[in-house]
Image (cartoon, rainbow, N blue to C red):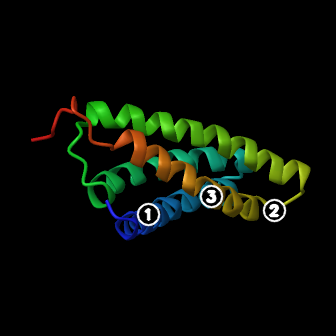
Amino acid sequence: MSASGGFARFLRFAAVGAVGTLAHYALLLALVEGAGAPPLWGAVAGFVLGALVNYALARRLVFASTRSHGQALPRFFAVALAGLAWTTLLMSLFMALFGLHYLLAQVLTTALLLAWHYAGNALWTFRRGRRDVEVR
């Protein structure tokens, strides 16, 4: 893949991620502002919803993966769970240590983790290998 093709794929990944992020933030706001949940719990729940949206869209629209769900989904969630750990750490740091509002903390966390999620999914989750089982 050419450098420009890789950048275009990264941009598609970011666009797909924006849709997942919208779902994430919508649930975050609904839980925190609507239901009175603690911001950290809202961020975690939003992260899980966003991950599910991102898997479905990235698999099809970004990576055009033929890897079976049985192979790709566990890898995707391994990358996502590592991202969730980073989200929890960064949100806690930004809010407790730096005193940032939870929404600003979430925006910074999301921006920092974009490269992590792209690399993990491009290089491991959806990368085509010799032993991949194609979806028919």
SS for dot 1: helix
| Amino acid tagged 1 | Phe
The foreground one among 85 and 112 is 112
Question: Dot 1, how many residues are within 10 Å of its Cα: few (below 14), some (14-19), or many (20+)?
Answer: some
Give the quarter of the figure containing the C terminus: top left
Residue beneath disc 2: 101
- Choose mark 1 or mark 2, whichever is in front: 1
* Residue plotted at (31% across, 51% down): 59
Is any atom of residue 110 visible in this view?
Answer: yes
Of pointers 2 and 3, the one earlier in the residue sequence: 2
Left or right side of 123 for 48: right
Residue beneath disc 3: 110
Question: Dot 3, how many residues are within 10 Å of its Cα: few (below 14), some (14-19), or many (20+)?
Answer: some
Q: How many marks?
A: 3
Residue beneath disc 1: 10
The foreground one among 35 and 87 is 87
- Choose mark 1 or mark 3, whichever is in front: 1
Of pointers 1 and 2, the one earlier in the residue sequence: 1
